Image (cartoon, rainbow, N blue to C red):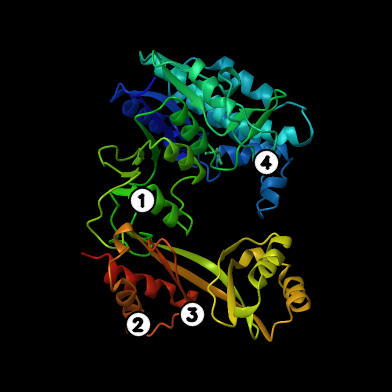
């Protein structure tokens, strides 16, 4: 089974017939591309909503879009989904009446409660895989839709955020073969009770990672709509270039801090077997993309700079914190009790700051601070909002003297005050917290100081 390539194509890569033809050419260009995981059709020029969102909208009778301030009725979503698949079938010139009939019947299902949403949400991937397999076949390729229900892609019954069960790997090994091109719908699986449950949003990446793990893939290609992982957000710094190679650890540090290239969890299964992940662009297949590997030799210091906005820090000062055993634990327990994820906690002798996503404090800030006051009696407590964390990352920074100094000088030259500084113990990244209004200028200054050749 080993030595084959798993390719996952995201929503924009399969949004219409023209895109699906690009996918076909990519798959046909390398006979090792035997496992093709597909998303539901994404947004395109004719519809600014993804098929998956329309499906959620049908299942919730219009609540999905209503809760986002958009008035699109369930009926309208139904028509758009069916219309989209009809257009696909027509434009690809395949015989797909049965597929459209099955789609309409599934979308009229009266299945109820939480199973309903997952069943509907899964239909985009389910029917897209069927359409794509039929198209590949019509073009003379030996392709077959391999549905999660047929190949034993088992998931937990946590509807809306199901987790892949370990038995899936053996099931995939037994049911998939290199003899044909398997077109596998991403994003959903079957529970042990036989219900359909979806993974978290963007979950087709996870399906691809699990398939790559199961078949011992040569590499996992993640085809999307950008040329790869950029050094910094190219919308802010257009001269940023694509990073050719990154380690799993580096992409983790970058992706945890605002790089939304792909679902991070998808990487874990590949990392465990050292399967390289290649981020590629369906619209520019000749570009080599970004390769994510176990180890690499760094010729640069920083490789990229992540940025995370909407950061708040809860600042606590109390005499003798440094000598109080268990203070930090008691403090973090309070955040846990409020279900607030804590990112970093830079500390001094008698003070500590807990860095959080400020959206997580919505509606909870008063109760949180009251509890901290009551349980820990600080001398001073305050929450600072509207910061950005700017975080240079790179294995080349470890043991290189002067990187922090260069970075701090770059911000000093722009007259930007550093509110927080925190170096990760691995020395592969550090975080500067600055007020968000300074973040663009700060990012540009750090780009010039650390990344620009
Ligand atoms: N179609 C699903 C979503 O929009 C899953 C995916 O595309 O990966 O979240």
The residues tagged by marks 2 and 1 sit, at their Cα atoms, a distance apart of 27 Å
**Gap in Å between the C-alphas at discs 4 and 1?**
32 Å
- Name the residue carrying label 1: 229
Identify the residue shown where x is 70% and y is 82%.
Answer: 378
Instruction: Name the N-terminal-most of marks 4 and 2.
Output: 4
Q: Residues within 10 Å of mark 3 (few under 14, many from 20)?
A: some
Nearest to N terminus: mark 2 or mark 1: 1
How many circles with numbers are drawn on the protein? 4
Residue highlighted by disc 3: 419
Vertical side of 3 occupied by 367: above or below: below
**Image quarter of residue 199:** top right
Give the residue number, with chain letter if any, for mark 2.
414
**Residue shown at the point (49%, 45%) measured from the top left:** 263
Secondary structure at numbered mark 1: loop
Q: Position of residue 149 (x, y in %)?
A: 61, 21
Residue 44 visible (yes or no): no
Circle nearer the viewer, 4 or 1 = 1
Residue 228: percent from the left, percent from the top?
34, 47
**Which is closer to the viewer, label 2 or label 3?**
3
């Amino acid at each position: 089974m080993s030595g084959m390539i798993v390719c996952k194509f995201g929503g924009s890569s399969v949004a219409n017939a023209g895109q699906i033809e690009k996918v076909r050419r990519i798959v046909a260009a390398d006979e090792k591309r035997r496992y093709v995981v597909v998303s539901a059709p994404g947004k395109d020029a004719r519809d600014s909503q993804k098929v998956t969102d329309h499906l959620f909208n049908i299942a919730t009778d219009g609540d999905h879009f209503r809760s986002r301030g958009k008035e699109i009725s369930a009926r309208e979503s139904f028509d758009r989904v069916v219309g989209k698949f009809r257009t696909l079938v027509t434009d690809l010139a395949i015989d797909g009446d049965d597929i459209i009939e099955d789609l309409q019947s599934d979308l009229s299902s009266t299945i109820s409660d939480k199973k309903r949403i997952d069943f509907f949400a899964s239909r985009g991937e389910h029917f897209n895989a069927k359409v794509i397999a039929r198209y590949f076949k019509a073009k003379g390729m030996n392709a077959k839709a391999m549905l999660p229900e047929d190949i034993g892609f088992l998931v937990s019954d946590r509807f809306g955020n199901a987790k892949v069960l370990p038995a899936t790997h053996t099931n995939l090994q037994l049911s998939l073969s290199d003899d044909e091109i398997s077109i596998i719908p991403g994003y959903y699986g079957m529970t042990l009770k036989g219900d359909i449950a979806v993974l978290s949003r963007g979950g087709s990446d996870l399906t691809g990672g699990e398939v790559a793990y199961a078949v011992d893939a040569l590499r996992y290609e993640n085809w999307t709509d950008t040329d790869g992982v950029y050094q910094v957000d190219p919308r802010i710094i257009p001269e940023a270039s694509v990073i050719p190679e990154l380690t799993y650890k580096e992409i983790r540090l970058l992706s945890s801090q605002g790089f939304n290239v792909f679902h991070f969890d998808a990487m874990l299964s590949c990392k465990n077997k050292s399967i390289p992940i290649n981020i590629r662009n369906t619209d520019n297949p000749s570009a080599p993309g970004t390769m994510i590997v176990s180890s690499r030799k760094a010729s640069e210091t920083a490789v990229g700079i992540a940025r995370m906005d909407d950061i708040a820090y809860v600042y606590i000062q109390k005499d003798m914190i440094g000598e109080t055993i268990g203070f930090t634990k008691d403090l973090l327990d309070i955040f846990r009790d409020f279900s607030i994820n804590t990112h970093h906690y830079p500390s001094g002798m008698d003070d500590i700051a807990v860095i959080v996503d400020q959206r997580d404090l919505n509606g909870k800030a008063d109760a949180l601070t009251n509890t901290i006051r009551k349980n820990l009696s600080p001398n001073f407590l305050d929450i600072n909002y509207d910061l950005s964390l700017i975080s240079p990352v790179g294995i080349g920074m470890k043991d290189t003297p002067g990187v922090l100094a260069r970075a701090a000088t770059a911000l000093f030259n722009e007259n930007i005050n550093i509110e927080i500084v925190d170096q990760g113990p691995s020395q592969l990244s550090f975080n500067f917290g600055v007020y968000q209004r300074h973040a663009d200028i700060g990012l540009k200054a750090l780009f010039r100081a650390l990344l620009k050749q």
